[in-house]
Amino acid sequence: MDSQLEQLMLALESAVAGMSKEQQGWHIPGKWCAAEILEHLYLTYTGTIHGLERVLALGKPLATRASLRQRMRIFVVIRLGYMPEGRKSPALALPKGLDREMVQRDMAAKMAIMDAIIAKCEARFGRRVPLLDHPILGPLTGSQWRRLHLVHGKHHRKQILLLRKML
């Protein structure tokens, strides 16, 4: 697996290590609990996998041309590593109440599958070719998809650590 994704997996595992089911379910009113944050991340990996499977099935990238606004967002998130606060999650990545134990057990495998399909797309279409549009950032290459998941995961790891601190 890509080193960035390995780093993220270890960071997420350490963030919830030792937390009970009840602790993982505790949240600030109106905010997600640790279990919901992990499910959200899991769903983003699933969404990326499904999107890139479509790319491979169709035999061509599905990325559009980036607008100026999208290029600015890509620069902030991918290049600077900053995930802005307060952005609403796309509906596909909203927690739906998946089994918490299954999410935690399968998260590393889901990341590995995502990394493998990114690598397949890069091998087939090239490393510098935008493969698929992100719903907010727009068209991303394989390495940008990996970096996005790292930045996004670290953003949510901070939220989990804050919840731990508040318990």
Image (cartoon, rainbow, N blue to C red):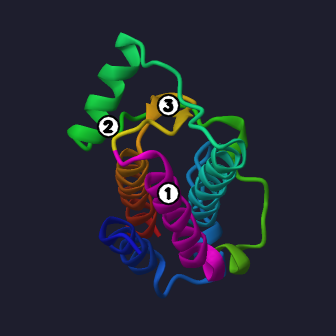
Which class describes the residues within 10 Å of circle 3: few (<14), some (14-19), or many (20+)?
few
Q: Amino acid at mark 2?
A: Val
Q: Amino acid at mark 3?
A: Arg
Which residue is at the far left?
80
Which class describes the residues within 10 Å of circle 2: few (<14), some (14-19), or many (20+)?
some
Q: Earlier in the sequence, mark 2 or mark 3?
A: 2
Q: Earlier in the sequence, mark 2 or mark 1?
A: 2
Considering the whole magenta stretch, tell me its main secondary structure: helix
Is disc 3 placed on a helix, strand or loop?
loop
How far is disc 1 from disc 3 in space, using C-alphas? 25 Å
Is disc 1 placed on a helix, strand or loop?
helix
Depth check, mark 2 against mark 1: the one in front is 1
Left or right of residue 68, residue 37 in this image: right
The residue where tag 2 is placed is: 77
The residue where tag 3 is placed is: 87
Name the residue: 32% across, 65% down. 4
Which class describes the residues within 10 Å of circle 1: few (<14), some (14-19), or many (20+)?
many
Left or right of residue 12, residue 88 in this image: right
x, y percent for residue 156: 44, 55
How far is disc 2 from disc 3 in space, using C-alphas? 13 Å
Q: Earlier in the sequence, mark 1 or mark 3?
A: 3
Label ID, residue 118? 1
Residue 102 vertical placement versus 122 (above, below): below
State yes or no: residue 45 in magenta: no
Asked whether disc 1 touches disc 3, contact meaning CB atoms under 8 Å apart, the reply is no
